[in-house]
């Protein structure tokens, strides 16, 4: 068995920062004291003789905050822009921690453990996530990015023709760092502690200062140790009640690098290249203890071993050329490859039938290409007409090893997507602006599992209409309205996934399984979900910065896709098996209200301290029409989500303090006539303090998940004759992080 703590090339880079695996807080502070001696050499400044004064006329200096606010204010479609200042304010170690505080955004899973990013509480696939305006490549996770790699985050609540209509909940566009010639390099060195485990991270952002090439290079390296603990209680009326305790200790090491290189030529010619590289390794060992509650003397123990490796490389490029004073042509391309290899073993130490030996492997290679062209023309009367053509191809090759034996076969699958669109954004008069667009998209998915060839094709037309009304053009109030059509296509894995057996109930040992641990297969006959949406929003942009906004939305969804668990006759077992597969289950609707307030406290009360307040609260409601109530909501959609945060720079001291509270209530979801799920209350408190030694050096202390709370989930299956509930409690802990921030 491989020792997960064996040194690798990555650990050699980070070893001086990590020290011992279970570093004490004193050791962390000692290492930080050493690091603090480094910037002393960097703080000396050379006094230069200023040049003779020159009259430059009127000069405007704008901060990023103003630019972000203007981009939001001037967009006809509802848009929120989060820039570098707000991204780095809290000192987050992952991008998911930044996103969870944004209006209407939720992150699935236990606090601090990462999870799917969702808007408006809607499940996976409803939120479109873009990287520099391009769809995320297969297998890519937002948690693979660090906040230091991101220039800004754009949130569009309603789809547009250019960004794409596979966005029933909305779109999150993550724009990577952009180089600035006059900006010094950023270097951040971080050490953290969680449940006695020490972790380290280094982030470096280098800005190129050459001509005619400009740009930036970002490098992040991490060595992260983490414990996981969970307890599962199984309450059943047709088999013995059980209790399972799972524990594991894992180590993740990774290196992430990206760059943005831009060349500017004559006559408006530009070439931008954006390479991106990721490499990460994960190793964890653990054990599972199981016992029957009716017979406490009957216990089982199994040892687990988990190894995985992920490597991805991608190159995006963009060529722009001005054809005339009113016309511009842009061409974008992308190509990339990702490899993933995971090996999980479960070895039973004792054998009483509660736990069994299991092997689960997944090895796949994804290759993807994209080619897009966009033509922009400025017309009379303020019209800006944009048209484009897009092509994207994805190919996956997966070896047969998903714990399903020879029945699964090798998987070879591909997706080809074509799209064309046209849109016009224009001003009707000083009070009204409008946007009209239409988009056509065709997606062909083909896959071969063993000897079976599966094929699915979807074609969707999506008309889009947005409008913005300013009651008084001289003031900052505005109302946005949207009437759109959007859609969600089945994923490649929804349609052509190979058979995966239940880990504890493999057919060669257990001919029949249980409904809470079903086998899983794909469904090639799925249809795309279509949604008609209405958005209505009001915004007031405050003088001196800040915004107050309220947004109301509704989506009517047809052909909803949901995993259903049914007892079926199957070819891989002599007895009927419980099988989970995605199905189109009918129509659904979702609606909600999103409120946001960002302002400085003394803007509302003159005598108050100048505390920057960041707050938002969203309320959601949904219903799946063909599932009886109550709680027949869309999957994993909470009834609300809320954030309250603030930041304050102390007077007379170079100290800034701040924090945030993120809260999601618990809720039940009725998934079908027989199946329910439960998501527990989630409350996350994060606080930080930053001491600035100089304009170039600062020390930041961040405490994430200050008041840790166990996270509960549950699944219940009741057929009328059989009932079983599996309830899981996941532990999580406080994370203390110390970071040295330097500009060099």
Image (tube, rainbow, N blue to C red):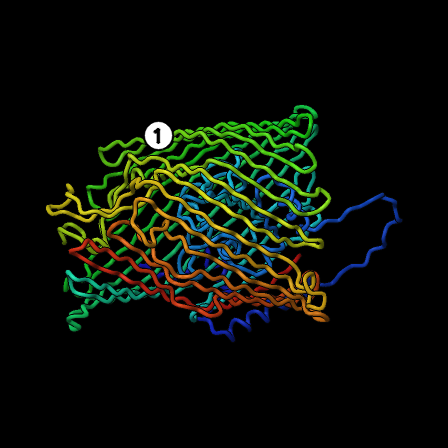
Q: Is residue 408 left or right of residue 314?
A: left
Q: Residue at x 68, y 62 (%)?
A: 604
Q: Which residue is mark 1?
A: 457
Check the picture and name the quadrant holding the C terminus: bottom right
Q: Is residue 504 left or right of residue 31?
A: left
Can you give x and y, in whole percent of width and height, for residue 563 in the image? Answer: 29, 46
Regarding residue 512, the answer to whether it shows in the image is yes
Q: Is residue 632 left or right of residue 509?
A: right
Residues 516 and 364: in front is 516
Q: Secondary structure at mark 1?
A: strand
Q: Residue at x 88, y 45 (%)?
A: 54
Can you give x and y, in whole percent of width and height, for residue 594 in the image? Answer: 52, 52
Residues 702 and 428: in front is 428
Regarding residue 6, the answer to whether it shows in the image is no
Residues 348 and 485: in front is 485
The image quarter in which residue 358 lies: bottom left
Can you say whether 179 is above or below 464 in the image? below
Can you say whether 486 is above or below 200 in the image? above
The image quarter in which residue 231 lies: bottom left
Can you give x and y, in whole percent of width and height, for residue 427 in the image? Answer: 66, 33
Can you give x and y, in whole percent of width and height, for residue 122 in the image? Answer: 42, 48
């Amino acid at each position: 068995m491989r020792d997960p703590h064996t040194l690798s090339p990555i650990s050699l880079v980070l070893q001086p920062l990590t020290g011992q695996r279970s570093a004490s807080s004193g050791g962390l502070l000692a290492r930080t004291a050493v690091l603090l001696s480094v910037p002393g050499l960097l703080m000396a400044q050379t006094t230069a003789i200023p040049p003779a004064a020159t009259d430059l006329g009127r000069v405007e200096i704008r901060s990023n905050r103003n630019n972000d606010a203007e981009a939001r204010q001037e967009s006809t479609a509802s848009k929120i822009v989060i820039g570098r200042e707000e991204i780095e304010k809290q000192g987050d170690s992952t991008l998911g921690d930044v996103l969870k505080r944004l209006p209407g955004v939720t992150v699935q899973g236990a606090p601090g453990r990462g999870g799917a990013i969702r808007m408006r509480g809607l499940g996976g696939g409803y939120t479109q996530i873009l990287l520099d305006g391009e769809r995320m490549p297969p297998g890519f996770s937002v948690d693979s990015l660090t906040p230091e790699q991101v220039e800004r985050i754009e949130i569009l609540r309603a789809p547009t023709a250019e960004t794409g209509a596979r966005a029933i909940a909305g779109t999150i566009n993550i724009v990577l760092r952009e180089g600035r010639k006059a900006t010094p390099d950023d270097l951040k060195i971080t050490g953290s502690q969680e449940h006695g485990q020490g972790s380290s991270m280094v982030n470096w952002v280098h800005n190129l200062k050459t001509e005619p090439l400009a740009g930036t290079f970002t490098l992040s390296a991490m060595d992260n140790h983490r414990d996981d603990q969970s307890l599962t209680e199984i309450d059943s009326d047709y088999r013995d009640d059980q209790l399972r305790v799972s524990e594991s200790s894992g180590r993740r090491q990774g290196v992430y690098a990206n760059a943005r290189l831009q060349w500017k030529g004559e006559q408006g010619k530009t070439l931008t290249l954006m390479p991106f590289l990721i490499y990460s390794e994960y190793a964890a060992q653990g054990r599972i203890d199981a016992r029957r509650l009716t017979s406490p003397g009957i216990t089982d123990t199994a040892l687990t071993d988990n190894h995985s490796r992920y490597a991805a490389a991608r190159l995006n490029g963009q060529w722009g050329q001005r054809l005339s004073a009113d016309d511009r042509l842009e061409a974008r391309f992308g190509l990339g490859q990702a490899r993933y290899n995971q090996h999980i073993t479960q070895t039973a130490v004792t054998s009483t039938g509660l736990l069994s030996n299991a092997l689960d492997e997944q090895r796949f290679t994804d290759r993807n290409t994209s080619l897009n062209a966009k033509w922009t023309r400025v017309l009379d009367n303020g019209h800006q007409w944009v048209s484009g053509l897009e092509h994207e191809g994805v190919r996956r090759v997966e070896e047969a090893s998903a714990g399903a034996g020879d029945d699964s076969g090798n998987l070879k699958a591909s997706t080809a997507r074509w799209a064309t669109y046209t849109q016009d954004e224009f001003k009707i008069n000083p009070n009204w602006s409008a946007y009209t667009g239409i988009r056509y998209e065709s997606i062909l998915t083909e896959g071969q599992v063993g000897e079976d060839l599966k094929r699915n094709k979807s074609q969707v037309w999506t008309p889009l209409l947005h409008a913005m009304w300013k009651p008084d053009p001289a003031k900052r109030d505005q109302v946005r309205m949207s009437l759109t059509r959007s859609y969600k296509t089945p994923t490649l894995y929804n349609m052509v996934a190979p058979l995966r057996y239940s880990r504890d109930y493999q057919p060669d040992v257990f001919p029949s399984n249980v409904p809470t641990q079903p086998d899983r297969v794909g469904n090639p006959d799925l249809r795309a979900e279509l949604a008609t949406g209405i958005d209505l929003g009001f915004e007031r942009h405050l003088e001196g910065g800040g915004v107050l906004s309220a947004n109301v939305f509704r989506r009517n969804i047809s052909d909803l896709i949901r995993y259903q668990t049914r007892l079926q006759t199957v070819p891989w077992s002599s007895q009927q098996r419980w099988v989970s597969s995605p199905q189109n289950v009918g129509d659904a609707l979702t609606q909600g209200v999103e409120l946001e307030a960002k302002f400085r406290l003394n803007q509302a009360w003159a005598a108050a301290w100048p505390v920057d307040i960041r707050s938002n609260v969203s309320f959601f409601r949904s219903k799946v029409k063909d599932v009886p109530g109550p709680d027949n909501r869309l999957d994993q959609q909470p009834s609300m989500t809320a954030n309250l945060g603030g930041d304050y720079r102390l007077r007379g001291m170079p100290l800034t303090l701040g924090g945030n509270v993120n809260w999601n209530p618990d809720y039940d979801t009725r998934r079908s006539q027989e199946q329910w799920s439960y998501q527990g209350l989630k409350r996350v408190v994060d606080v930080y303090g930053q001491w600035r030694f100089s304009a170039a050096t600062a020390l930041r202390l961040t405490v994430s998940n200050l008041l840790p709370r166990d996270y509960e989930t549950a699944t219940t299956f009741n057929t009328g004759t059989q009932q079983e509930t599996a309830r899981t409690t996941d532990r999580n802990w406080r994370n203390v992080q110390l970071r040295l921030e330097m500009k060099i």
